[in-house]
Amino acid sequence: MKVIINGGGIAGLTCAIALNKLGIETEVYEAAQEIKPVGAGLVLQSNAIKALEYLGIEVKIIEAGNPINQAAIYKANGKVIKKQKPESKNRELFGGIAIHRNTLHNILKSYLDDKIFFLNKRAESFTSVDDKVVLNFDDGTQAEGDYLISTDGINSNIRQQLIPGSKPRYAGYLCWRAVVDNAFNIKEASETWGRKGRFGIVPINDNKIYWFAVITGHEFDSRLNQFTVENIAEHFSGYHSPIPEIINSTPNDALIKNSISDLKPLDRFAFDKVLLIGDAAHATTPNLGQGACQAIEDVMVLHQEISIKKDMLQAFQSFEERRFEKTKFIIDASRKMGAIAQTSNPVAIAVRNFLFGITPEFVTERQLRKIYN
């Protein structure tokens, strides 16, 4: 049996590792022409760590990452809205690892034989031929396998073929990201919420900071889309220290800009011998920090179902049944959180900050358990 995996990102590599552990032959096809140290940071929260532990590949990742033991939400003037410093009894629930995306990618790739990894292979479509699945690339070549798992992200061509109406939906805000040296000795992860938008700071591995700035606006606003570091610094002027200092320490060529989008929850992930996982199946906004986490959780569930069912078609179907409600909840909750966090109405901001500030810890913990368990 051979499974072809379309997409060599976090979902695709983790999936290949899991299938190899089951003795299943895999080939991974990635659209990028070469692997470059690009991207910014991410946080692997406790559900992702548990999934990595299940797969037996957590040690290198935990050692490479930076533990996140406390987090906070601030007002633009630096006053606390909500601070979360988990007690020792809750570390298993709340503990996370902040890591550069490229570092994680390289660790995952180290578990695989280079011979199964193919670059510069952008899939346009698939066809079924003689009980096989054939992946068609834009260079005119093909790959053939018994099953296809597509992990090619929110703009998946394979999903578009299966569900033509499923297209990314803009969330209403743009995001700029960068990684800079942690010359500020920052220990906690934080977000600052104000009328001008959000600014996040996450200390990652190698004594670096991953920061992100989120501004509400039209997806094709020419002014916003041309923002430089200087423009971002001006936009967030008045926000508390060290936000101005972090922005001003960033070179323009380090900026990564994205329109924040997600997918309306799908009705299906499994289509006979083809399975969608990760962002190809359930792309979410980053407001809960669950994009990569849900992809890794996908792989754990798929491994379990293949182990139990043995038959791949049954495993694909069972995977869909187990993952549908959880991923829908994440998409919906993350989109709502983004709307709350991005509000610019002064009255709404005052009410939001007050309610967040008085919410009892047990309520917060109950909400987070729905995400992390």
Image: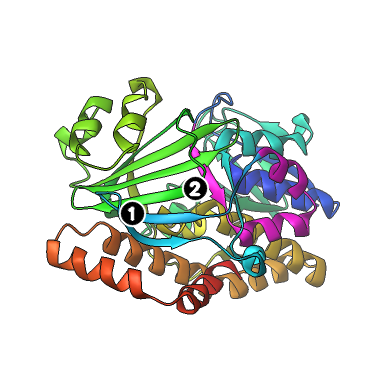
The residue that appears at 63% across and 57% down in the rendered structure is 48
Asked which secondary structure carries label 1, the reply is strand
Q: Position of residue 236 (x, y in %)?
A: 22, 39
The residue that appears at 30% across and 54% down in the rendered structure is 79
Check if mark 1's residue and mark 2's residue have beta carbons within 8 Å. Answer: no
N-term mark: 1 or 2: 1
Q: Position of residue 240 (x, y in %)?
A: 28, 42
**Cα–Cα gap, marks 1 and 2:** 12 Å
Identify the disc placed on residue 74.
1
Classed neighbour count for the residue bearing mark 1: other residues with Cα under 10 Å, few (<14), some (14–19), many (≥20)? many
The residue that appears at 74% across and 68% down in the rendered structure is 305
What segment carries the magenta color? 39-64
Q: In the image, 365: left or right of 191?
A: right
- Quadrant location, the C terminus: bottom right
Q: Position of residue 67 (x, y in %)?
A: 62, 47
Residue at which label 2 appears: 188
